[in-house]
Every structure is written in C-alpha cells, then in structure tokens.
Image (cartoon, rainbow, N blue to C red):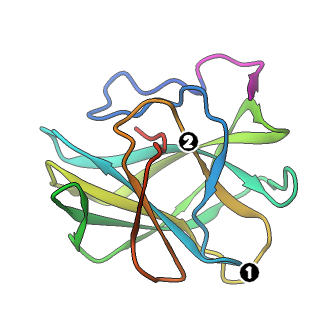
Amino acid sequence: MVTSDRSGELDCAVNAIFSQAPVNPSTGYFSDAGGMVQSLFENFYGLTEDIGGITVWAIMWDAGNCYTPGTQDFEITFYQDNAGTVGAMFQPPFNVTVTPTETGSFLNGSSVLRYDIDLPSSISLTNGWFSLVKLNPTNDPCTFGWLNTTVGDNKMAYTHAGGAITPFIENLHFV
C-alpha cells in the first residue's frame, strides 16, 4: 500500500502523450543489471508525437528501503511492436544518468522515487516497447523496483540475464 504526505508527486504530466498513471501500486518489479539481472519491458501505442522523455516511479529495495540520494545510471532501449509483443530493437540503447525525486510517498516502507528521464534524442514510434534497466556494475544489492499500476492493457514482458523475452500480465506505470 502506498502512503503519502505530499500531493502531486504521483501525478502524470498534463502534456503527456501516453500515460499509465501510478494508480494503486502494490509492488516493484526489479529491472536491474546487478544480482539477478532482470530487464522489464513495457509497451505504448497510438502516439502522434515523438518521445522526448519518460517518467517512471520506482523504489530501491534490499529487504527494505535502501535508497541513498544521488544519481543513478540506466540503459533505455526502444523496440518495435511485433503483433503485441516485443519486436526488433528500434535503435541502439541510450545510457542516461538520472537524479530521482523523493515523492514523499512510501510503498511497504520504501520511498517512492520519481525518475524524469530526458532522452538524448527523440524517438519516433507510433507503437512500440521500451526497456529501462538500472546499470549496476558493482552488483549493489540495492535494486531498482519499477512500480506496477492498475491502469493499462495488462501487457509487459521481462527477461532474466538476457534470456528469452517472456510476456507477463501486468502494468508498469510511466508517462
């Protein structure tokens, strides 16, 4: 259950071109290059404008809240849609550095963080998928947990250690 003492930090941007709002998150799914090396994929569709950035909400977790303020590095990759599943890579991945914002909300005792990610160049895809993976070269046990939502089309996917991409019935929230 999410508890909050600040309003607005979980709201989607008014000018968003696509949104799976952070409604009733109950867990964070790991998308981290350390430890178990899991990558998550989420889809989008019906875009009429280029993608210039993405916002996601997450927790940092290691048997409890382990977030330490500072920057975090991510790899974000865009994929074509293949009849409702993850298709071919659209372009090489972007590596981005993000400083998350503490929202004042908590999920199971962990601080809910808002990650506003500006892309180095815009992406022009009407329908597609993207993966967002926290880079973790030191194998830090404090892992990135992308929060779920009750809003969306119940299509996401994951892979362990670069293995097969597996469809999963769930929604991750992003704008």
- Residue at x 29%, y 57% (from the top left corner): 129
- Where does the magenta region start and end? 1-8
Residue 85, percent across and down? 26, 60
Q: CA distance from mark 2 to mark 1?
A: 24 Å
* Camera-nearest label, 2 or 1: 2
The numbered mark, 2 or 1, whose residue comes first in the sequence reads 1
Residue 147, percent across and down? 59, 44
Q: Is residue 6 magenta?
A: yes
User: Can you tell which quarter of the image residue 46 is in?
Assistant: top left
Residue 4, percent across and down? 75, 22
Q: Residues within 10 Å of mark 1 (few under 14, many from 20)?
A: some
Asked whether, in this view, residue 18 is left or right of residue 21, the answer is left
Nearest to the observer: residue 13 or residue 174? 174
Amino acid type for the residue under numbered disc 1: Asn
Nearest to the observer: residue 51 or residue 150? 150
User: Can you tell which quarter of the image residue 161 is in?
Assistant: bottom right
- Residue at which label 2 appears: 148
Q: Which mark is residue 139?
A: 1
